[in-house]
Every structure is written in structure tokens, then in C-alpha cells.
Image (tube, grey):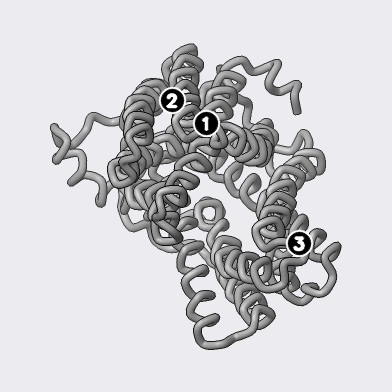
Amino acid sequence: MLDLLRRRPAFRRLWMAGTVSLVGDWLAFVAVSRLALDHGGGALALVGILAAHSLPHACLSPIAGFVADRFDRRRLLVGIPLVQAAFTLAMALAAAAGALVSLQVLVLVRSAFTAFMVPAETAALRHTVEPPELLQANAIVSGTWSVTFVAGMALGGVLAALGPVPAILVDACSFFLAAGLASGLPSLRPEGEREPRAAGVWGLVRAVPPELWEALGHARARPALFRAVFSKVPCAVAGGMGWVSVNLLADQAAPFGAAAVSLGILQSVRGLGTGLGPLGISLLARGKEEPGRPLEHAAALVTFASVAGFALVRPWPLLLLGIALLWGIGGGSNWVLTSASLQRLAPDVMIGRLSSIDDLSTTTTMVVGALLAALLVEASFSLVAIGAMGAAVGLVSWIALSLRRAEAPLSSGAPGVAPAPRI
């Protein structure tokens, strides 16, 4: 896998920029969350920080996908981190003053710009490797997420001990470094791009719904592409319900000592699995441009089985670790396989919008799954029952998606797939 980084300098730059930014994000998240608790905000303030990190990303995904299909992706990958760096420096000032409300507002605004990075990175990646290398490239990206999660959280804990300001300043530096790395990429303008249909910011915003509808119609008429866009959804809804089970089980049973320690261990092991799964997929599908549906089915089934079995092995801590690892392996493999398929099948002029639909649907269904599980807890359902329901909902959704056939496109005149030039 490391050979791909050596042979593809553009992919190496893209990967390094994303890695640096991820580490900064995780360590700042720890620092800001710690500040919320230290200032007496309690759980509500902590939830506010979490919401500020995630909600703008999901809500702005459709606009972000539209932008990635209209403008040079290189300029986005350089410009957005610079804007984020500026807001992060302002966050450091707010943290130094102990202004928690101002800090949350700044996190909210900065997170809004983060939404524009996902489709831009997705659209750019396919230009940096050959088609048979897409699966391997996505495996590297997924494995890196797993490593940066552990490293960023650990480094964040160390820096947070010195106070939140140093961690936030390091995060700001990471954005400047990411922008510098991305500036070395060549121009990545969308192929077959068209002139914007309306001028000005409001004109672009008004153009988003029909453009998104056009991309969805293009996918609906092509079952393989439609599955690539929505195949994370079944695992996301099951994972959202399972996430509630993990937190409650750690709190109630504390299988590894204190509840916080137990939760940290379980989540770390699951994070390790998200890196090992893609690595295994990359080895199994080496040299294949299309790994085949059996691997996708296997990844989904492992995820559903893990969600269903997690609470069942509650009395046995070692089995809990094994199930958590398998859960991560299944989820990480699902992410890599579906992301590679999307990059392989989507027209370059539409991949930003299709990636944003993927991102929005995955985030939304995960939250819906977690909310459904919370309601079931309030209704006195057991964790075993919640896990079984989560697995069942995910499995039924997966079967429905797999059996889906082509439909008439929602919009005519969608551009065809053009091969992307490699750098």
C-alpha cells in the first residue's frame, strides 16, 4: 500500500494534507470538549460542542457537492483550510478569554466550511490514481482515519492538560500546513464542466436543488451507481443504534473498570477495526478494478451481526472486544468498498453532488438510528433487543437496496461518464 504513495505524488500530497488536518481536528475536539466541562457547562454544553462539529457539515453537504462540481477542486482544497485556520485562531482567542459561547459559535462556523472538504477530496482523489488503484487508495485513507483518531485523541489529551489554547493553536497550524501541501496539486477542474446557470451567491444557492435532483436522477437510472451512493446507509442506521448500546453498556456494566475507561477501550478497538478492515479488503482485491458484490455483502453482514451480538456477550469482556473489532472491520470495509465504487462509476462533473448525497444520507440515518435507539431505551427495551432491531433494520435496508432495479432518470441531459485524467 505504501508503494502507491511513492508512485503517485499527487495522491501523496492529497493524503498528507488530509492526514495533517485530521490530527488537528481530533486534538482540538478534545481540548474544546474539556473546556466545556471545566467551565461548568456539563453534559448539555458537551452535546452543544458535538452538535456544532457535526450538524453544519450535514446540512451544507448538498451545497458543498454543488460547489465541488463547479469549481477547481485544488482551489477549494487550498482556500477552505485557510479560512478554517482563521476561524481556529479566533477560537484560540475565545478559549483564552474563557468565552465558551463565542467559542461554540466559532466552532459552528468553522464546521460549516468543513462540509466543503469531503466532496472536494472525493472528487480530487480519482484524478490522482489509476482506476484499479481506487480501492487501495481509499483503504489508505480509511486506515489513516483510524490512526489519526487514536493519535489525535491521545495528543489532544496531552495538550489539553496544558490548557485548551495550545491544542487549538496546533490545530490552526495544521490547517496552514494542509493548505500548503494542497497548493502543490495541479489544477483539478471538473471535466465537462458547464458555466454556472446563475450569477452571484444567491443564484448559486438557488441552482443547488435542480442540480442535486439531476445527479440523483442520473444515479437512479443506474443501479450500480445508486448502490454506491446509498450503500453506507444500512450500516449507518444499524451503527447509530449500536452506538447507543456501546455507551449504555459501558456505563452500566463497566467491563474494563470505570465507565469512561471502558467506553474508551471499546471505541479504540472499534477504531482499530476500521483500519484493519480496509487493509484486508485491499489485499483480497489487489489488482482488481471491481472487487465484486460478495465482498460488499460480507462487510455489511459482519456489521449487522456485530451490532446484534454486542450486548449478547456483555458478561464476557474479551468477547466484547472481539465483537467491537469485527464491527469496526465491517464498517471500515463497507466505507472503502462503497467509496471506491462511487469514484469509479460517477461522472466527474457529478461526483461532488453524488458524494454530498452519500455524506448527507449517511450522517442523517446514523443520527436517526441513534434517536430510535434512545426512544427504545426510554420505552424500557433491553440493549439486546435494541441491537437485534438495529441489525434487522440494517439488513432489510441492505436487501432492499441490493434488489433495486433501474428507474427512469429524474432529469434528462445528464452528462455521461468520461474517463478522468491521471496525474
Determine whether, in the image, residue 125 is placed left or right of residue 172: right
How far apart marks 1 and 3 lie (CA) works out to: 30 Å
- Residue nearer the viewer, 286 or 152: 152
Label 2 neighbourhood size at 10 Å, few (<14), some (14-19), many (20+)?
Answer: many
Corner quadrant of residue 303 = bottom right
Residue 231 shows in this picture = yes
Q: Are marks 2 and 1 in contact (CB under 8 Å)?
A: yes
How far apart marks 3 and 2 lie (CA) works out to: 36 Å
- Residue nearer the viewer, 317 or 394: 317
Residue at the spot x=14%, y=40% of the render? 202
Q: Residue 336, image x and y in percent? A: 64, 45
Q: Secondary structure at mark 1?
A: helix
Disc 3 or 2, which lies upstream in sequence? 2
Q: Nearer the viewer, mark 3 or mark 2?
A: 3
Give the residue type that dot 3 points to: Gly
Dot 2 corresponds to which residue? 172
Give the residue type that dot 1 points to: Gly
Residue at the spot x=50%, y=25% of the render? 170
Q: Secondary structure at mark 3?
A: loop
Q: Secondary structure at mark 2?
A: helix
Residue at far bottom of view: 380
Dot 1 corresponds to which residue? 24
Q: Which mark is residue 270?
A: none
Determine whether, in the image, residue 162 is placed left or right of residue 294: left
Label 3 neighbourhood size at 10 Å, few (<14), some (14-19), many (20+)?
Answer: few
Dot 3 corresponds to which residue? 257
